[in-house]
Image (cartoon, rainbow, N blue to C red):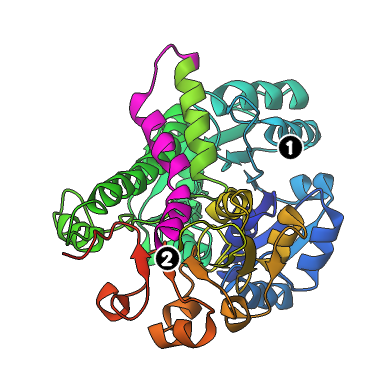
């Protein structure tokens, strides 16, 4: 079975390389020639743990290559996965222009092809898109009928940046939305071959259900994060309360579960904020006002500013103070700063007149592209802390977890620490230096 993957972002490239690493022949297609060249040299154009080694292995074995040539990729494969981005339009709805453009060009070439071919939408798209827009465009361009000349599926992905390889090899479940039985069976067969005896539960369902499952999944996880952040904001006002213990205790209830209950400065990234907005716009378009989803966003929008409030509570006015920001990526193990809370925090600190110095193990180049020279970029964590009046932990990189109160005392001008991601033990820090943390109530 030959596979082509359209869109070589972290979703498409990781998926394609993982498939190839288990013996499938995979062609990766992207419009960006620079990206294609980088990948064919064995380099990953973004930071994703484990992907580089895997890519090199599949290139060496001739099981994977990248190209801009849509024509050859369609003619030379049996199944196409569409993995292009669906960013937000100004009104919050999903921008389907990249999906549309891939579908049109694939459709035209499908018209030339003899035999059946399966098209799989893996991009996150609003309910009705695959069975509506995608099917219509494919039929129009190819002059073939879905379910006869070609097959059609919607197969959402649930991989997280930073652990995308692991998530691809060991997903909790596989969701296959199918236009017809043959398409669903073909895709199920591919996954059974890929996962072997470790195949997770496979849910075969309608195209619209598959589309909605993806949105519901991300919305629920985002809701867990906003929920625990709300509890954190309450706990912070209660003497001797600590959201960490509360999260651990409620997470032991099987009905709640322990994951995605880490209180912090809010969620960012290219998925949760965009998918929540798209689901809200979609619901409103269907004349339903989704109150919970709106509240999830509302809590998240104000959460980053808690870091600035805590900094003020420790050192007073920030004007003229040197504030060290530890972590810029929207989460650890990635260099991605899309919708990262760090950007909001930096802007708020600058508005308050602070001098901001930043450090991140991987996301400095991407941050520089967004923020330019309004902040000072430190070469390492020590340089970032040196002479600072306050340090704020914004991303929970392992490197920051190793810092002790003595490190802050030694390096900073007036040591004060805001733990925005709950990586330090308050018992170790309190009493040694001014210390505040999200969801940590005042000591009695
Ligand atoms: C998310 C989903 O977790 C994936 O299942 C999904 O496939 C992906 O979106 C997507 O739609 O493509 P991702 O955005 O890569 O993955 O990262 P997450 O690990 O979900 O983290 C999202 C944000 O929530 C981060 O800013 C993280 O710091 C924050 N978060 C997460 C918390 O603040 N607390 C937590 O307990 C968990």
Measured Cα–Cα span from mark 1 to mark 2: 46 Å
Which quarter of the figure has residue 254?
bottom left
* Boundaries of the magenta span: 285-314
Q: In the displayed structure, would residue 9 be above or below residue 126?
A: below
Q: Residue 418 shows which numbered tag?
A: 2
Residues 208 and 217: in front is 217
Around disc 1, counting alpha carbons within 10 Å, would you say few (fewer than 14), some (14 to 19), or many (20 or more)? some
Please state if 21 lies on the left or on the right of 301 as rendered.
right
Sequence order check, earlier mark of 1 and 2 = 1
Residues 196 and 212: in front is 212
Which quarter of the figure has residue 243?
bottom left
Residues 298 and 201: in front is 298
Q: Is residue 286 on the magenta stretch? A: yes
Residue at horizontal 67 percent and vertical 75 percent from the top? 378
The residue identified by callout 1 is 102
Which secondary structure lies at badge 1? helix
């Amino acid at each position: 079975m030959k596979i082509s993957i359209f869109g070589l972002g972290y979703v498409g490239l990781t998926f394609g390389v993982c498939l190839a690493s288990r013996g499938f022949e995979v062609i990766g297609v992207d419009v960006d020639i620079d990206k294609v060249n980088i990948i064919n040299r064995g380099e990953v154009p973004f930071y994703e743990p484990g992907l580089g080694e895997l890519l090199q292995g599949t290139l060496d074995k001739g099981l994977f290559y990248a190209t801009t040539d849509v024509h050859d990729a369609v003619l030379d494969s049996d199944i196409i996965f569409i993995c292009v981005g669906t960013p937000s339009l100004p009104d919050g709805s999903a921008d389907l222009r990249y999906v549309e453009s891939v579908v049109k060009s694939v459709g035209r070439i499908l018209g030339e092809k003899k035999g059946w071919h399966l098209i799989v939408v893996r991009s996150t798209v609003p309910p009705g898109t695959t069975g509506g827009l995608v099917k219509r465009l494919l039929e129009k361009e190819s002059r073939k009928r879905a379910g006869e000349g070609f097959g059609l599926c919607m197969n959402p992905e649930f991989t997280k940046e930073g652990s995308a390889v692991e998530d691809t090899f060991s997903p909790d479940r596989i969701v296959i939305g199918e236009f017809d039985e043959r398409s669903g069976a073909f895709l199920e067969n591919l996954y059974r071959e890929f996962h072997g005896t470790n195949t997770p539960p496979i849910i075969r369902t309608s195209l619209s259900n598959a589309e909605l499952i993806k949105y519901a999944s991300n919305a629920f996880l985002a809701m867990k994060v906003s929920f625990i952040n709300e509890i954190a904001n309450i706990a912070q006002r209660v003497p001797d309360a600590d959201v960490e213990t509360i999260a651990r205790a409620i997470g032991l209830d099987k009905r709640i579960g322990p994951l995605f209950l880490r209180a912090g400065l809010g969620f960012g990234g290219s998925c949760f904020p965009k998918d929540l907005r798209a689901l809200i716009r979609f619901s409103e378009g269907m004349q339903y006002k989704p109150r919970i989803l709106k509240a999830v966003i509302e809590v998240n929008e104000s959460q980053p500013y808690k870091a600035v409030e805590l900094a003020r509570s420790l050192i007073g006015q920030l004007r003229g103070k040197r504030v060290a920001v530890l972590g810029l990526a929207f989460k650890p193990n990635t260099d991605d700063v899309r919708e990262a809370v760090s950007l909001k925090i930096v802007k708020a600190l600058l508005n308050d007149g602070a001098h901001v110095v930043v450090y991140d193990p991987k996301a400095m180049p991407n941050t520089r592209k967004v923020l330019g020279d309004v902040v000072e970029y430190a070469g390492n964590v020590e340089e970032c802390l040196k002479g600072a009046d306050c340090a704020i932990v914004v991303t929970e990189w392992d490197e920051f977890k190793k810092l002790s109160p003595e490190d802050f005392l030694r390096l900073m001008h007036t040591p004060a620490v805001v733990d925005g991601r709950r990586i330090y033990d308050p018992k170790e820090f309190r009493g040694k230096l001014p210390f505040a943390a999200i969801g940590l109530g005042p000591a009695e």
